[in-house]
C-alpha cells in the first residue's frame, strides 16, 4: 500500500479563505472619491438653512413650551425667545439677499434709496451704524438688484459677526466709479479675506454672505478690496458708474 498526502483539505481551506476575503471586501466601506462636486449657490444655501435653522427652532419651541407650563418664568424666557427669533430672521434675511434672480427695473432707483432699504433689511441698530454719503453719490441711478444684495449682505454680515462693534459705511463717487466702504473693529481679516477669495460657495452658511458679495460685485464688473490696520477691517466695494 502506498501512502500519499491527502491534499483535499488544504484545497478546501484555500477556497474558504478566498470566499471569506470576498465577503469582507463586499462589506468593507469604500473610500469616497477625492474630488467631490462643488455645490451650486442654491444647493449651498438650502443645505445651510436646513442645518442652521434646526437649532434655533428647537430652542424656540422648547422656550415656548416652558412658558406654557411655567408662565411665571416669562421674565427670563421671553428675552431668550426674542434672541432666537432675531437669529432666525437674520438667517432668512441673508438667504433672501443671497439667492433669487436678478431683476432690472425700467426706472433706476437712486442709490440713497437703495441704501435706506438695505439698512432696514440688515437689522443693524441705528446706534451701531453710521452712514455717510459724500457729494452726489446718493444721486447715482441703480438699475440692478444685485447692488442692494451686496449692501444688505455687507451690513448683515457686520450685524451677525461683528460682536456689536460700531459700523461705519461711507459711499463716495469718483469718475467712472462708486466706492462703498464698510469699516468695523475687531473683525478677523484672515477669515473675511478667505471668504472673499473662495472660488465657490461654502457648504454651510458660514461665509455665504461674503462669498455672495464678491461674486455679485464681479458680475457687475466691480472689485472687492480690504484693508487691515491691526484694529479694524475696511472692506471697499468698487462698482462701475455707468
Image (spheres, grey):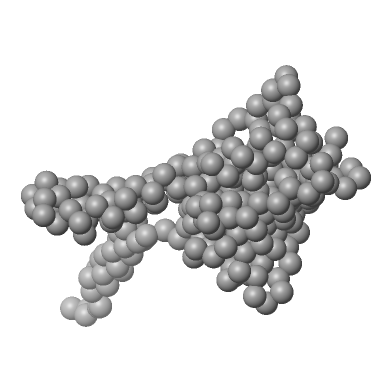
Q: How many marks?
A: 0
Q: Measured from the top left, where is residue 27 in percent x and y?
A: 32, 58
Q: Is residue 61 left or right of residue 156?
A: left
| Image location (x, y in percent) of residue 93 | 49, 42
Q: Nearer the viewer, residue 126 or 195?
A: 126
Could you say where residue 72 lies in the image, as x and y percent from the top left?
11, 54
Q: Is residue 161 left or right of residue 154?
A: left
Image-quadrant location for residue 185 = bottom right
Quadrant occupied by the C terminus? top right
**In the current view of this chain or complex, which residue is farthest to the right?**
175
217 up-or-down from 31: above or below: above
Camera sees residue 41:
no
Q: Is residue 65 left or right of residue 185?
A: left
- Residue 201 image offset from top left, x and y in percent: 58, 50
Q: Residue at x 49, y 63 (%)?
A: 164
The quarter of the image holding the N terminus is bottom left
Q: Which residue is drawn at the image coordinates 66% and 35% (left, top)?
A: 113
The correct choice, above or below, for 187 with respect to 217 in the image is: below
Identify whether 26 is placed above or below 222.
below
Residue at horizontal 41%, vertical 44%? 89
Identify which residue is drawn at 26% across, 69% down.
13
Amino acid at each position: 500500500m502506498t501512502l500519499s498526502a491527502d491534499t483535499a483539505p488544504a484545497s478546501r481551506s484555500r477556497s474558504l479563505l478566498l470566499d471569506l476575503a470576498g465577503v469582507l471586501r463586499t462589506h468593507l466601506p469604500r473610500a469616497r472619491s477625492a474630488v467631490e462636486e462643488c455645490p451650486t449657490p442654491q444647493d449651498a444655501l438650502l443645505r445651510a438653512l436646513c442645518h442652521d435653522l434646526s437649532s434655533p427652532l428647537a430652542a424656540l419651541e422648547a422656550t415656548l413650551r416652558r412658558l406654557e407650563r411655567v408662565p411665571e418664568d416669562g421674565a427670563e424666557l421671553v428675552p431668550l425667545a426674542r434672541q432666537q427669533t432675531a437669529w432666525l430672521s437674520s438667517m432668512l434675511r441673508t438667504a433672501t439677499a443671497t439667492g433669487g434672480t436678478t431683476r432690472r427695473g425700467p426706472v433706476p432707483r437712486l442709490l440713497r434709496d437703495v441704501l435706506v432699504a438695505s439698512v432696514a433689511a440688515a437689522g443693524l441698530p441705528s446706534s451701531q451704524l453710521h452712514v455717510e454719503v459724500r457729494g452726489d453719490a446718493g444721486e447715482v441711478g441703480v438699475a440692478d438688484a444685485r447692488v442692494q444684495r451686496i449692501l444688505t449682505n455687507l451690513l448683515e454680515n457686520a450685524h451677525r459677526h461683528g460682536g456689536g462693534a460700531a459700523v461705519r459705511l461711507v459711499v463716495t463717487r469718483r469718475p467712472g466709479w462708486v466706492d462703498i466702504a464698510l469699516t468695523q473693529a475687531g473683525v478677523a481679516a484672515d477669515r473675511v479675506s478667505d471668504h472673499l477669495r473662495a472660488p465657490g460657495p461654502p457648504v454651510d452658511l458660514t461665509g455665504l454672505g461674503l462669498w455672495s458679495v464678491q461674486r455679485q460685485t464681479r458680475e457687475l464688473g466691480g472689485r472687492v478690496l480690504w484693508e487691515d490696520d491691526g484694529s479694524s477691517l475696511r472692506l471697499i466695494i468698487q462698482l462701475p458708474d455707468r
